[in-house]
Image (cartoon, rainbow, N blue to C red):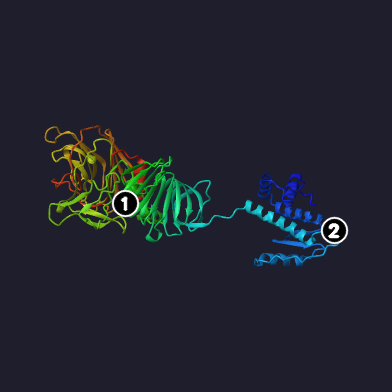
Amino acid sequence: MNNRLNNDNINELLFRLLENDISEEGIQHLGNWFGSDPQAIKYYCEYVNDYAALKNCVSVGFDGDKLQVTGSDEFDMAAWSALAEVERTAMTVDVEKPVAEPVEVARGITKIEKQMPSKLLIYTAILSTAAMLFLMLLLWIVPAEPPIIASLGYTVDAVWGQSTEEKVMGEELRKGGYYLEKGLVQIVFYNGAKAILEGPADFELSSTSSLELFNGKVVANVNREAAGFTVKTPSGKVLDLGTEFGVDVDLAGNSDIHVFDGEVVLYPQNNIKKVPLLKGKAKRITTSGQQKDIELNKYAFVRQDEFNSNVKALQGSQYHRWLAYSYQLRRDPSLVAYYTFEKDGEAPDILRNKASLTEYMLDGDLYSAIDGKLPSLTAGRWPQKTALNFDRSQRQVVVVPSDSALHINGPITIAAWVRCGSPDDGGHIVSCRLPEGKANYQFAYKVPYANPTEMGKKGQIHFARMDGLISISRRVKIVYSNRTFNPSAQWKFIAASHDNKEVRFYVDGRLIETHELELFQESVIADMVIGADNVADDRSRFIGDMGELAVFKRILAAEEVGEMYKAGKP
C-alpha cells in the first residue's frame, strides 16, 4: 500500500468506507480531508487499487483526467465493462419465475458441496460499491448548484457584503441569499419583473418570480406578463397584480408597503385574510400581523427614473448628474420649497414645488400685470433642461400663496441658479414679506439700484429681514455684499444663509463674505414672491433667467453648498 500518507486514521476510514461500515462522523472526516488535501482523490484511488489487489481483483487509477480500471489475468475486463454497460442501459423486463421440475431424490446420505460465487460477481460488487460510495461522497462534498433565476442589471456604487461575491452587470444570479452593503442594484428576474434594491439590504432570491427581503428597501416594476411577482418579508408577503410598488423592511422585520401604480394584495403574517392595496396607498404591517395606514412617500425609495439618472450620470451625462443629485436633495427634511423650473406640459402656468415634504402644497402661480405676458420658458443649463425668463417690463413674477411652512424666522439658507447678461439684469430672486415692510426674508442678486440709506451699491448681493414697519421704525435689517458683479451671460450659483446672528454669502459654491446681522423677529404671514420684492414694486423686479431655487429652514454647511454647486454646474 502507498505509504506517502502515513495516516492510520485515514486508512481505517477508507477501509470502513469500502466495507460499507463507516459512520456519519467518518464521512464528515473524509469530506474535510477531500476538501483540504489536493492529493486526497489520488490517494483514494490508490487505496482502492490496493484493496482490490488484496482480493485478487482489479487495479484502479488515473490516465490524465480519465479513471482507468485494469484487471488481473483471471479477470476479463472487456466482459466486466460490457456487463456494466448492459446493466446501465438495459430496460427492465419482467421475467416469469421458473417452476422446478420434480426430481427424484436418492435415498441415503448425499454430500452437498458448497457452490462458491463467481469471482466476477464478487469483484464487480466490490468495485461498484467503492465507486458508488465515492460518488456519494463527492456529491456530499460538492452539492449541486442552485438554479439560475435572474440576472444582474445596472449597478450604481454597489458594494456587496463579505458573504456575497462581487457581481458584474449581466451576471447570472442563482437562487440563494445576498447582502448589499451600500449602493443600488437592479435585478432582472426571468419572469420579466425588475427589482431595484438599495443598500444596506439583506435578501434572498427565491424563484424566477419572488424574492424575500429580510431588511432594506426594494422597488418592484412588474408588467402584466410578470403579474404574480411576490416579495416576502418577516411580516408577510406582497403579491403583485401588475404594478409598481416599494417595500421597506426595518431591522425589527416590520414592513412599509407603498403602491405607486396598479394594485397589490397583502398577506400579513399570522392572518389568513388578504388585504388589497391600491395605487396611491401605503400600509405598515408588523411582524405580529398588525396593520396601519400610512402616507404614501414616493421619495422614500429610489424608483426607476432616479435609478436611470444615476446610471446615466455614471456614464458621463452632466444633466443626469444634476438630476440624480436633485432627487436626493428633495428628500432633505429641512427643504421647505424647491423649484427646478422645468416644463410641466399638464400645467404650463404652474411652477411645481419638488420638495418631498411640501410637494403639491407650495406650487407657484405664474403672474403678470399684463394679460398673456407670463414668464416664459427658455433654455436651461443643458439642452434637456428648461429655465424661466423674467421680463421686468412685463411685470412678471411667480406667487406662492401664504403657507406657514414659508414663514421662516429662524435659521435659513436660500440658493438659486441665475443668469444675468446685461447691466440692467438682476433683481430680487425671492421675498416673503408684507408690502409695508415686515419681512421673513428677502434675497437679491445684482441689485438694480443703489440704496443710499443702507449704503447699497448697484450690482451687489443682498439679504434682508425686517421686524417693523418701514414708515414708522425703520427697523429694516439689510446686509449687502462688499463685492459687486458685472454681467457675464453665464449661469451663476448664488446662496445666502442666516442663523439670526450672521449672514454668509456664497458664489459658485465658495463662501465669499460673512456679515453680522443679529435679528430674531416674529414671523410674518405673507405670500412668497419669486422674481420681485413684492408684486406691486416694479423697481426691484428680477430680469434674467432662473434655473433653480431652494429654500431650507436650516444652515447649510459650506461643504453642502459646494456639493450643490458641483452637482448643478453646467
Coordinates of residue 128 in the picture (x, y in percent): 72, 58
Coordinates of residue 314 in the picture (x, y in percent): 42, 54
Coordinates of residue 505 in the picture (x, y in percent): 29, 41
Q: Residue at x 25, y 34 (%)?
A: 517
Instruction: Name the residue carrying label 2.
Output: 112
Q: Residue at x 28, y 35 (%)?
A: 499
Q: Amino acid at mark 2?
A: Ile
Coordinates of residue 343 in the picture (x, y in percent): 26, 56
Give the crowd class for mark 1: few <14, some 14-19, many >=20 residues within 10 Å: some
Q: Is residue 48 visible?
A: yes
Instruction: Name the residue carrying label 1.
Output: 278
Q: Is residue 147 left or right of residue 479?
A: right
How many discs appear?
Answer: 2
Q: Are marks 1 and 2 in contact (CB under 8 Å)?
A: no
Task: Say whether disc 1 or disc 2 marks the residue closer to the N-terminus.
Answer: 2
Q: Nearer the viewer, residue 361 or 401?
A: 361
Q: Quadrant of the C terminus?
A: bottom left
Q: CA distance from mark 1 to mark 2?
A: 87 Å
Q: Is residue 64 visible?
A: no
Q: Is residue 250 left or right of residue 330?
A: right
Q: Is residue 567 left or right of residue 4?
A: left
Q: Residue at x 73, y 47 (%)?
A: 13
Q: Nearer the viewer, residue 341 or 165?
A: 165
